[in-house]
Image (cartoon, helix red, strand yellow):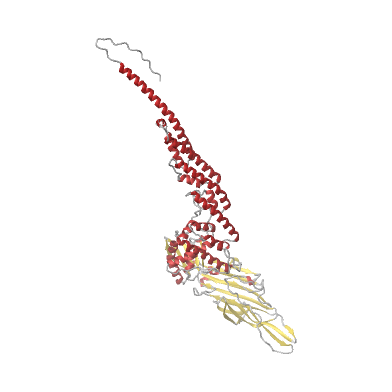
Amino acid sequence: MRAMSRRGGRRLASIGLTIGLTIGLLAPPAGALAAPVAQAEDLTPGLRIEEAVTYTVGLSAAVVHVTHVVTLTNETPDEVSGGWITEFFFPEYAVAVPPSATNLAARRDGPGRLGVRLEPAEGSFATAVVDLVPDLRYGRTQTVQVTYDLLPQPPRSGALAQVNQAFATFPVYTTADPGLATVTVSVPVGLSVDVVGSTMQSTVADGRLVYTASAIADPAQWWAMVVVRDDDALVGRLVFFDDIGVHVQAWPGDTEWLDFTADLVERGLPALEAAIGRPWLVHGQLEVVETSAPYVYGYGGWYRHDRSLIEVGDDLDPHVTLHEMAHAWFNPEALDSRWLTEGLANEYAALAMAELGLGRPEPSDLPEQGRVPLNAWADFDLDDPETPEREAYGYAASWWLVHALVAELGPDGVSDVVQAAIERVSPYPGAGTGALTRVPDWRTALDLFEEAGSTTAEQHFRDLVVTPEEAALLDARAAARAEYAELVEAGRGWAPPAVVRRAMTDWEFDAATAAMPAAAEAFARRDAVAERLAAIGEELSDEVREDVEAAGDVATLRGVVTALGEAADAVVEGTTAVRDANVLARLGMLVLDADEEAERARAALARADYDAAERAGRAAADGVGTATAAGGGAIGVVLLAGGLLVVLRLRRRGRRRPPEGEAPAEQPTVQPAIL
């Protein structure tokens, strides 16, 4: 709004000698989409302004009726100097209105219309200039009422205020003096209402939802955008993807947007799924709704993961729409990093556009203004005047970084990283790691990018992502990863124990490096065990490897390795004893099972049952000794028994039959042998 005044002057004795001069001008707001710039509290010095503004929404009729009731008081006294009287008076008063305002009218409080003209827009607003009749002189008060309507505007016209049977959005504001302004918005009950910007209180009266702000302390800083919706009045079309319905809903009459978006959904979702390399996971039916509500916040669209809802503006922008569709994959439930989800959505939307033959947009150069580490790029704050520049920088920088990684690793390489992150796979895999217990964030992403082969990710993160405090954490990480790489090499195919890997995954680098000497010692002892087992033709099994890898603390790790060494010693001893057994032992083992104990020992070691392996190994070794003694005893028995048989046979052979008629000779008595 602006107030106009004229200064008139006359000599005390003169009559009617006047000159005119405009001395005051209040420019209308520069735009409703950016936070207002601080101004002087009194926007019109010398003119007291009390105002009540009412916005009455009639969505079914596609209209918003607006009424400004303004009470003006001229507080600029006349001046007397050198025999002249200088009179200050206001011949006109101006109200800032949306350029689409129609049915403009003005009248005094009471009967009588006033002249009003609409001047062209300056920035986002036009100006309704009211002719004050009579001119407002010092000490006088006039009450003026200005009315206009906000009616439907063509889609994609860029209108600040839009209204149709399903949707309305419009700015609300006032330029009254501090404490003298009241703003009211009246909406039928049952519609969805959002008030963006300054706070308004809501009540229900006579079947209408009424939002009010009264006695506004600083009108120059007070503003809001109102969004009213009736989704039941939208025009819908159902599109299917993977047997799941996608409900595309447009404003009544905007068939161009409906055709464009339905086609983009039908072709774009498969293209996104192919580019991302991961199945589409949406909670229930996805909705894509036409609304300019995101414009109020400075965005082209947004995705509400909890409602499976995409809301995009009326512009036919495939990159924006595909970007929001990509958030079905890239969202806070999958990745705890705003810059990462936004950068991925931008890049994969561009890749899908290329696949669909719609061109391939590229990220822009990084803006100089609004620079902030991406980890500090939080959701915007309307009250922060730096928000627009920070938002522009955050989107540009996040896309630039993801695009650079795609250029290095390829879309499939980055897709593998994304899939691992979404599935919460540890960047340091091995037995006993398990899935991540937290939503992966930028730290997990950096680890996964490097595990995928990126040699540039860390520097990009240093340049664009981390805060100064987090840069020191990257230094600790670099040192820990260098030691970890040596440990991986020492493992020769075995992952470092879980006590190290979990600490690395959680970026607890002091704990990780503290456990690494014990892990290195464990690998050295494992090598010694493997060498001893090789002498008997045995190897360490996967079960043993998993047992060592799964050790979650140093004490457990040392206990496992000690038990492994003792079991292996027993297995080697028992197996060697069996294999090197002499004839006597082998004869004894026909009765005893020392060789079977050795087999049981090797089998127990293979399944990482160290106690059983040690017992069986010792039993095998002891059994060979027992078998040797048993074998010797058996041979003695055989020899003695054999000697007796020989003696008996010889004696038997020494007897002869006497000739016929001759009496048999007397036989000696045979004493039985005592064995």
Q: Quadrant of the N terminus?
A: bottom right
Q: Is residue 147 left or right of residue 642?
A: right
Give the x, y percent position of residue 601.
45, 38
87 or 530, nearer to the observer: 530
Q: How many marks?
A: 0
Q: Say if 443 sits above or below 69 in the image.
A: above
Residue at position x 47%, y 65% in the image: 349
Q: Is residue 234 visible?
A: no
Q: Quadrant of the C terminus?
A: top left
Give the x, y percent position of residue 272.
45, 63
Give the x, y percent position of residue 425.
49, 54
476 or 148, nearer to the observer: 476
Outermost right residue? 82
Q: Say if 631 sits above or below 486 in the image.
A: above
Outermost left residue? 660
Q: Say if 657 sits above or below 240 in the image.
A: above
Q: Say if 664 sits above or below 324 in the image.
A: above
Give the x, y percent position of residue 76.
70, 79
Q: Is residue 639 visible?
A: yes
